[in-house]
Image: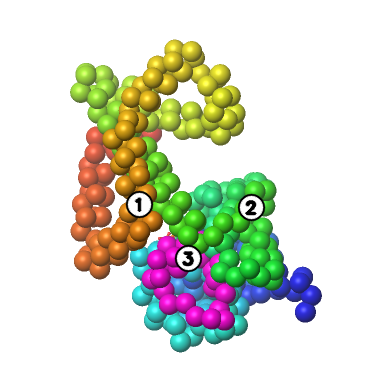
């Protein structure tokens, strides 16, 4: 069989889970001419798939009808659902994920000669679909369980079909998992958000208006990140005022002191040695009480209230 027959265009892909990533992958694959079927439980996602003119079916049926199984369920739910369907998974299947959490931390059982891969766009499902519709591209990473040209061709053609065309690079399961978890904890969903929250609070405690505090500590973060990604670190530094650069450079070094650096190392170690994964799965198995408390805290935080007031976002 020629290598061309091994691209995603010649396969049936089952998208298992039709949420944030699942919907974007499915729509983009279909628009790229790939045969896609949707495996979903009845409910919100199932109805969304119907609305999007798919013919969703149970996860079991989708597994039975497909060549490539793309597991796009929440990482914390995936081990149980995977195990429930293990008997249906055949050696002819190729197993894909958008994040290596379950594979890397051995939360799903693996067997030879099955081949596994990660195909992860660097962005949310929403950004992936929006970029595709505009004819633009998101960066994408992939990892392969085996050094195999056919598998590589399948996965790179999958990434291309979902709209990751310009900057595709290879990683491995360990690296993707550790870097993704560390990035979201240290910066994206942890460090950055807490810094914004605490800085907003300081301005309010010192008598400044909610609107001023919001725009200075939160809204403008987006604008500075856009400058950074469009012009690089040095280019961004040249585009802000000398006062902003001088003050920011000094304050940044004070804030990210040795304590913070030590804590970052600890956070990374806990990800790498599996402590975080173990704690998270325990949290899931015991009813996610801490997660619900954290969500409540965010919902009731002063910063959340200002989104409603300034931007009308609820
Ligand atoms: N979100 C991102 O930006 C992003 C980025 C890169 C990679 N990823 C990875 O992509 C994967 C999917 O994440 P996601 O954010 O797309 O998930 P999500 O938006 O939470 O979607 C989850 C889907 O799984 C279904 N589901 C949830 N629990 C289920 C259960 N017990 N049985 C059957 N179906 C169930 C949901 O259906 P219902 O509507 O019925 O609940 C929904 O269709 C994860 O591996 C994640 O790490 C996510």
Q: Residue at x 22, y 65 (%)?
A: 287
Give the image's coloring scheme. Answer: rainbow
Residue 125 within the magenta-colored segment of the rendering: no
Q: Residue at x 25, y 28 (%)?
A: 201
* Residue at numbered disc 2: 168
Of residues 12 and 305, the one drawn nearer to the viewer in this rendering: 12
Horizontal placement of 9 versus 127: left or right? right
Work out how far the residue at label 1 is from the one at label 3, CA to CA, in angstroms: 27 Å
Q: Can you tell me whether the CB of the residue at mark 3 lies under 8 Å from the nearest atom of ligand 1?
A: yes
* Residue at numbered disc 3: 72
- Crowd rating for badge 1 (residues with CA inside 10 Å; few <14, some 14–19, many 20+): some
- Crowd rating for badge 2 (residues with CA inside 10 Å; few <14, some 14–19, many 20+): some
* Residue at numbered disc 1: 269
Q: Quadrant of residue 302?
A: top left
Work out how far the residue at label 1 is from the one at label 2, CA to CA, in angstroms: 28 Å
For label 2, the SS is strand
- Answer above or below: position of 273 versus 182: below
Which mark is in front, 3 or 2?
2
Q: Where is residue 277 in the image (x, y as percent from the top left)?
A: 33, 61
Q: Position of residue 50 (x, y in %)?
A: 51, 68
Work out how far the residue at label 3 is from the one at label 2, CA to CA, in angstroms: 20 Å
Q: Quadrant of residue 227?
A: top right
Query: Which region shows up in magenta?
Result: 95-117
Residue 310 visible in the current orientation: no
Which mark is in front, 1 or 3?
1
Q: Which residue is drawn at 77% across and 70% down?
A: 4
Q: Where is residue 77 in the image (x, y as percent from the top left)?
A: 36, 68
């Amino acid at each position: 069989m020629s290598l061309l027959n091994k691209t995603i265009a010649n396969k049936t892909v089952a998208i298992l889970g039709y949420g944030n990533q699942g919907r974007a992958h499915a729509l983009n694959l279909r628009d790229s001419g790939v045969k896609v079927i949707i495996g979903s439980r009845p409910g919100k996602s199932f109805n969304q798939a119907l609305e999007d003119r798919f013919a969703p079916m149970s996860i079991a049926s989708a597994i039975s009808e497909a060549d490539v199984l793309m597991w796009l369920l929440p990482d914390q739910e995936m081990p149980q659902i995977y195990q429930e369907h293990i008997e249906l998974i055949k050696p002819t299947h190729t197993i894909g994920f958008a994040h290596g959490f379950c594979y890397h931390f051995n939360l799903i059982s693996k067997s030879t000669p099955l081949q596994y891969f990660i195909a992860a766009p660097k962005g949310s499902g929403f950004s992936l679909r929006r970029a595709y519709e505009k004819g633009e591209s998101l960066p994408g990473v992939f990892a392969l369980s085996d050094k195999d040209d056919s598998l590589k061709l399948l996965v790179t053609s999958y990434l291309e079909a979902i709209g990751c065309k310009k900057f595709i690079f290879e990683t491995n399961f360990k690296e993707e998992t550790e870097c993704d978890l560390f990035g979201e904890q240290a910066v994206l969903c942890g460090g950055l958000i807490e810094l914004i929250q605490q800085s907003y609070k300081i301005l309010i405690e010192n008598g400044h208006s909610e609107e001023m505090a919001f725009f200075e500590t939160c809204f403008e973060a987006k604008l500075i990140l856009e400058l950074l990604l469009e012009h690089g670190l040095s280019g961004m530094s040249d585009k802000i005022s000398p006062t902003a650069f001088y003050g920011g450079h000094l304050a940044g070094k004070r804030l990210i002191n040795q304590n913070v650096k030590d804590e970052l190392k600890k956070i990374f170690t806990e990800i790498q040695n599996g402590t975080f994964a173990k704690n998270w799965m325990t949290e899931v198995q015991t009813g996610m009480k801490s997660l619900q408390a954290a969500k409540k805290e965010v919902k009731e935080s002063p910063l959340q209230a200002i989104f409603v007031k300034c931007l009308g976002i609820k």
